[in-house]
Amino acid sequence: MAAIGLTSRLVTAILGMPPLFAWAKRQARQMMIDRAEGMGVPWRQIVAEWRSQDLTPDLAAVENPAVVYPDYYTTSFHAYAEGNLGWEPALEVEVAALAVHSRIFPEGGPDGDARLRGSYHQALRARLPQPPHRILDGGCSVGMSTFALQDVFPEAQLTGLDLSPYFLAMAHRRSQAEPQRRAIAWVHGLAEATGLPDAGFDLVSFCLIFHELPQAATRAILRESYRLLAPGGILP
Ligand SMILES: C[S@@+](CC[C@H](N)C(=O)[O-])C[C@H]1O[C@@H](n2cnc3c(N)ncnc32)[C@H](O)[C@@H]1O
């Protein structure tokens, strides 16, 4: 026990030194990338493809400068000092999700993300009396959950809402690149106070978001969701 306490104090002291902390962070990051690529997720290739694109017009198209960020959203998160509010986390969101989700199923593999979403949609469909006409995807990030919902309900009118304009810029770019899809409305805003009309949605979906939020924010989002739901609408 004493040895563990000493080791832990030593590690904390070492990581308290900025150059050593930066080195440890780089090492951890490299390990994460190598592990992802070992599992068949071409991390560097996908990020390099995104990085080669100029996404500033997409950012301008989606960003709402009037948005006020809550404190919980402006701290470092997922090893990014800027949290979700920057290009670096945006460029890596998709590969990080593919890597993390590839380990969910016992066999593992890069289709873990698709399987995870598939099982969510299966449960969703079982609860829906009929296909929803208007869907809100709250916390839509770079659009992975939104496009996946659109694949299942191609006739629906979709709105993707997120607090990160960088994430939304990538979602917007992907929409532009896939004109065969029905247009999706990308909304930069707070899920707690969306500014969207009362009773405007038949399905309000939050995929993989609440585990990241403080409880008070989750409660506020659920209250707002009930306002957004049309009679008979579903919040799974
Ligand atoms: C783990 S990601 C989930 C992304 C996506 N739904 C998916 O399934 O891939 C959580 C997302 O919620 C967003 N988010 C966090 N708090 C939010 C809030 N209060 N309002 C809107 N979006 C929020 C984050 O920016 C992030 O994109």
Image (spheres, grey):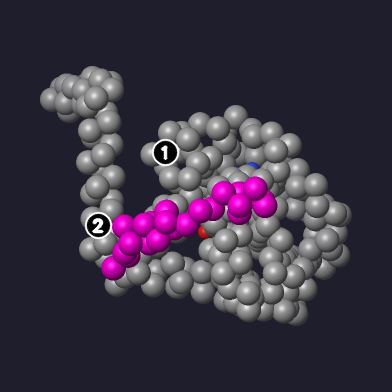
Given this view, does label 2 or label 1 mark the residue nearer the observer?
1
Q: How many numbered marks, from 0 up? A: 2
Q: Which residue is at 82% across, 68% downward?
A: 232
Q: Is 6 displayed left or right of 55 in the figure?
A: left
The residue under label 2 is 35
User: Ligand 1: does it lie within 8 Å of the C-beta at label 1?
Assistant: no
Which three-letter amino acid code belongs to the residue tagged 2? Arg
Residue farthest to the left?
A: 3
Q: Indicate the position of residue 147 as horizontal and vertical percent values.
A: 58, 69
Q: Which residue is at 86% across, 65% downward?
A: 231
Earlier sequence position, callout 2 versus callout 1: 2
- The crowding category of the residue bearing disc 1, from other C-alpha atoms within 10 Å (few below 14, some 14 to 19, many at least 20), is few
Magenta segment: 40-62
Majority secondary structure of magenta residues: helix
Name which quarter of the figure residue 226 lies in.
bottom right
Q: Indicate the position of residue 81 as horizontal and vertical percent values.
A: 43, 33
Q: Indicate the position of residue 118 as horizontal and vertical percent values.
A: 51, 74
Vertical side of 189 occupied by 36: above or below: below
**Spatial CA span between label 2 and label 1:** 19 Å
Q: Is residue 219 visible?
A: no
Q: Which residue is at 24% across, 25% downward?
A: 19
**SS at circle 1:** loop
Q: Indicate the position of residue 78 as horizontal and vertical percent values.
A: 42, 42
Which three-letter amino acid code belongs to the residue tagged 1? Tyr
Vertical side of 141 occupied by 102: above or below: below
The residue under label 1 is 80
Q: Is 117 displayed left or right of 222 in the figure?
A: left
As for residue 59 lying within the magenta part, the answer is yes
- The crowding category of the residue bearing disc 2, from other C-alpha atoms within 10 Å (few below 14, some 14 to 19, many at least 20), is some
Q: Which residue is at 35% across, 69% downward?
A: 110
